[in-house]
Image (tube, coloured by chain):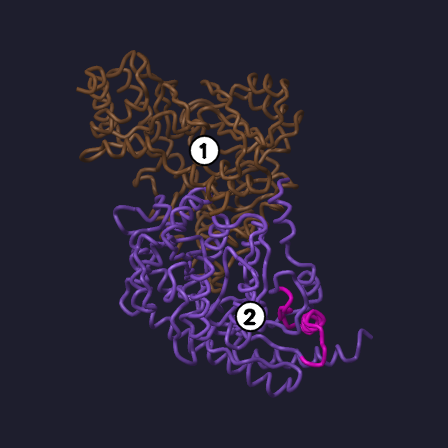
Chain colours: A brown, B purple
Amino acid sequence: VSRLAARVERMRPSRLRELVAASTSGPVLSLGGGLPPPEALPTEALAEAADRVLARPDRLALQYPPTEGDPGLIEAIARDLRTRLGLDAPADRLVVTTGSQQAFDLIAKVTLDPGDAVVVECPTYVGALRALAVYQPAFVNVPVDAGGMDTARLEHLLSGGLRPKLCYVVPNFSNPSGATMTAERRRHLADLAMRYGFLVVEDDPYGQLRFAGADIAPVAAHAPEVAYVGSFSKVVAPGLRVGYVLAPDALRRPVVLAKQAADLASSSFNQGLVAELLAREGWLDGHVEGLRRLYCERADALAGAVARRLPGRLWFDPPEGGMFAWGSLGDGVPAADLAVAAAARGVAVVPGEEFVAGGEPVPAVRLSFSMLGPADIDRAVERIALAFEDLNQGPG
Amino acid sequence: VSRLAARVERMRPSRLRELVAASTSGPVLSLGGGLPPPEALPTEALAEAADRVLARPDRLALQYPPTEGDPGLIEAIARDLRTRLGLDAPADRLVVTTGSQQAFDLIAKVTLDPGDAVVVECPTYVGALRALAVYQPAFVNVPVDAGGMDTARLEHLLSGGLRPKLCYVVPNFSNPSGATMTAERRRHLADLAMRYGFLVVEDDPYGQLRFAGADIAPVAAHAPEVAYVGSFSKVVAPGLRVGYVLAPDALRRPVVLAKQAADLASSSFNQGLVAELLAREGWLDGHVEGLRRLYCERADALAGAVARRLPGRLWFDPPEGGMFAWGSLGDGVPAADLAVAAAARGVAVVPGEEFVAGGEPVPAVRLSFSMLGPADIDRAVERIALAFEDLNQGPG
């Protein structure tokens, strides 16, 4: 077993998660996973797209595509990034990846040596932590508040001598915090990246799912040394595993070569399906509009139920989009204990420490509102209130 | 740029390949790539499968599947490996991968440290070389003849002190050599692996494409420390990117954890499509039978044309299956020069050095007979004969 394998082994699913799973009895109301609900998955549009893609006489959608991706899809993504986000997005800076997860892996593989400092939000997305941790960096946590990563704190660390190789952020409706980074902080982060010479990895799977407030330009709009990572998992379907990275020139070539070694190319069929959907005038806009309404209703239901049933015990800053709320806990209730108690009451939530590089406990749980309708969300919160009661009674 | 990136950079597409591409003028008859031809790709069966998979009310084919793979597909693969190959293939030793390429990457990632000895055939599959080289092993070449890897030579090296971490082989109709490892050598290799404690990575993408001779049990039938790697790229379609590995117990868990970090999971949709095809009574057998007839006819056409048009200049041991013939060259003609001259005549072949760890020239070219019908194969060989003439005339 290699040293890399030993590092991978340390990233195993946490004992805490196993403990929570073991506590579960009976059917579960899930505020746990960050998945689109079945009704958000466009099966009919995909069935039509599959028929069209498979009817093409060249059958290229079943062959090996270029490692960097299907040219038609790359053009469509470039156009979308230019028109929707105002990014300078030439096709030759894009690489299609097997989900955004592969983008994190490849970027880490070609930029990190063991011991390199990597700045992450605290809390941050656990999948990215897993991908980065394989290459054994020294993680540096920077706290997140309602305005996203505290870039003043980051500047303080940098002026104190911190020299990171890269900084990973989820500026829109972050997983897990639900927070959105302010425009000022995005510009500030871009300035810091240029001044101190580190790569920003800007992960934006939820940006299109805004249901309140106004769009904010991405960090990538303010600096060249940003790898902007996108995904169709949340706006089309996770099961297609189609993501992409808009990479700085110098990063793009090593990423393509590393991808060639890692899986040759992502599925040309699935790339063809996404390209077909993007080519249908207005389809994606209409579909995303439906998703926004769905998640807005659910976010409201969660906020209402929590205010009604858990006053003073659990609260969150209302997210402006996405799928997640970061439920802060009062009364010194350990998040892990609450997650175990909630599981015993048939509700899944994820304790905050799962999202912290280093795994230190934090007084919060992640609540995902994507999977349940409003009535089930209310029922789930009712059960969480019972879980609080259980905890106050002690272990019995 | 990390040290891994520097290694990746060294794996860039070879200058030779670029030179060959640059020589090409006009439409090309390709004996170059190892692809199924368009007519071998089952578009109608896949369109039906897509309709059925997308009509399922659970819509699980569009969600994240377990990292190890879609349970239905894993069961189908396990059944196939047991009935077709007699392998002990419990479902919990299988991992579905994003093409077999990802299996090579993940196995290398969790087993190799820089400097570890890795035994490969000479010549061997260039994609596997790329995947392995990222982790910076010391490659040890063992020659291949008509009976596959020369295991007596391997034993000699082992008894001389060689202690490899793994040995990569393509026992059936190898890419690029077309050679099939004899039953005796497979048993011998399994014995050596047990005696000297190394992992055998047995890559078998072509095993079902046998059109002459009798099936031979895989190396994995003779030893537990074999990672048997399979793929649906050649029997269904490359564009789905669905492969798998049947891994020894101790290897399976690190591979799953490494895969979770690398791309979370392979496409559930594509896994569902393959599972649907495998569930159709007799479909795969019928489809593969058609592929065998197709490739047999083309292999015969190539053998005939070469015997007729290139006597004494190029010859090969007739492959018993697969897509490749290894064209040995006489008269001291450098393979690279022949490839460049053939490209100028509008025929793609790949010079042997592309398939050698270390890149030393070898007096052979790989001829892939999968893409062209018999008449075009004859035309291509006719042009190769002209390329030989061009070479004899010198550069002019």
Q: Is residue A64 left or right of residue B264?
A: right
**Residue at the image point whose x is 40% and y is 74% from the top:** B216
Viewer-nearest of discs 2 and 1: 2
Q: Is B315 placed above or below A241 here?
A: below
Identify the image quadrant of the N terminus of chain B: top right
**Residue at the image point whose x is 56% and y is 47% from the top:** A75
Residue denoted by label 2: B153
Mark 2 and mark 1, same subunit? no
Q: Is residue B15 left or right of residue A75?
A: right
Neighbour tally class for label 1: few under 14, some 14-19, many 20 plus, Cα within 10 Å: some
Give the letter of the chain under mark 1: A
Assign a secondary structure to mark 2. Answer: helix
Q: Which residues are magenta?
A: B330-354
For the residue pair A325 and A144, the one nearer the viewer reads as: A144
Residue A65, x across and y down, in percent: 52, 56
Q: Is B315 placed above or below B16 here?
A: below
Neighbour tally class for label 2: few under 14, some 14-19, many 20 plus, Cα within 10 Å: few
Q: Amino acid at mark 1?
A: Gln
Q: Would residue A279 be seen by someone viewing this image from the given angle?
A: no
For the residue pair B111 and B164, the one nearer the viewer reads as: B164
Residue A88, x across and y down, in percent: 62, 37
**Residue at the image point whose x is 66% and y is 41% from the top:** A250
Assign a secondary structure to mark 1. Answer: loop
Residue denoted by label 1: A208
For the residue pair B193 and B9, the one nearer the viewer reads as: B193
Q: Amino acid at mark 2?
A: Arg
